[in-house]
Amino acid sequence: MTAPVDLHAPAPIDLVALAEGRDSEAGLGPLMTPPTATADANGRAAADAILNELGWIHERGVRRRQSAVLRLPLTWDASPGLATGVARALRGAWKQLGVQAPSVTASWPYVQASLLRAGKFSVALARLASGTDVDLYPWFHSRGAHNLTGVADQTLDAAIDTYRAALTRIDRDRAKQAIAARLGDLRPAIVLHAPLAVTLLSRTLTGVQLVDDLPRLDRLGFAPGRTDDSWIREP
């Protein structure tokens, strides 16, 4: 992805198939397609070539340049589930390239306030977990409260303002196209993980509980007294 903007139309997902382990039949499409061995090998070869060009030679399982060993401390908030999986995957991938990755854990408020906002990272990987129609104003508008990348672009600001003012689905989709295009040009951030938001639009649900960004199917239920869909409105 070049921008954290979901441009796909809503599609039905079979939760029963997910609960029964039939992931390929659940309608998740490309979200369930793992990277191919060829793509993985090509990415590893490209990373290896870049490190070699920078003088970091892979020797006895580690990258060395003269007497120095390449170390990339991985700072994360130690939260279970997806965060743990991502940290483990990063360390494993870097280890294959000979890069040492000591783990440094800290609370998310500390990482956000003391490190990200203070600009003490030369590189930061962040996960923006959001819905299909998320308001990106806080993250990418020049006056956004969570604009950690520091992007300030009039064209992007105008596209985000247009999205917020849109009254119809067509206008919102058109504004999202403009936001995605401008973010793709500016590249203010690298999207490490942007999960799909699952929305059940049938009747009012009860017992919604998420575990590792997935709903617990055994807890879901319908609220009593709802027999029609008149409550569904355009947001």
Image (cartoon, rainbow, N blue to C red):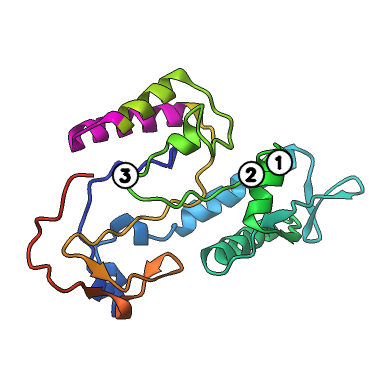
Residue drawn at point x = 79 percent, y = 57 percent: 62
**In the picture shown, does residue 204 fall above or below 191?**
below
Query: Callout 2: helix, strand or loop?
Result: loop
Residue drawn at point x = 54 percent, y = 39 percent: 146
Residue interval drawn in magenta? 165-185
Badge 3 amino acid: Asp
Query: Callout 1: helix, strand or loop?
Result: loop
Tell which of 23 and 7 is nearer to you.
7
On residue 121, which mark appears? Answer: 1
Disc 3 to disc 2, how far (Cα)?
25 Å
Badge 1 amino acid: Phe
Furthest residue toward top: 154
Tell which of 38 and 155 is nearer to you.
155
Tell which of 202 and 2 is nearer to you.
202
Pointer 1 local density, CA inside 10 Å: few below 14, some 14–19, many at least 20: few
Residue drawn at point x = 74 percent, y = 56 percent: 98
Pointer 2 local density, CA inside 10 Å: few below 14, some 14–19, many at least 20: some
Q: Quadrant of residue 90?
A: bottom right
Disc 1 to disc 2, how far (Cα)?
6 Å
Read off the residue under disc 2: 124
Read off the residue under disc 3: 133
Label pair 1/2, CB-CB below 8 angstroms: yes
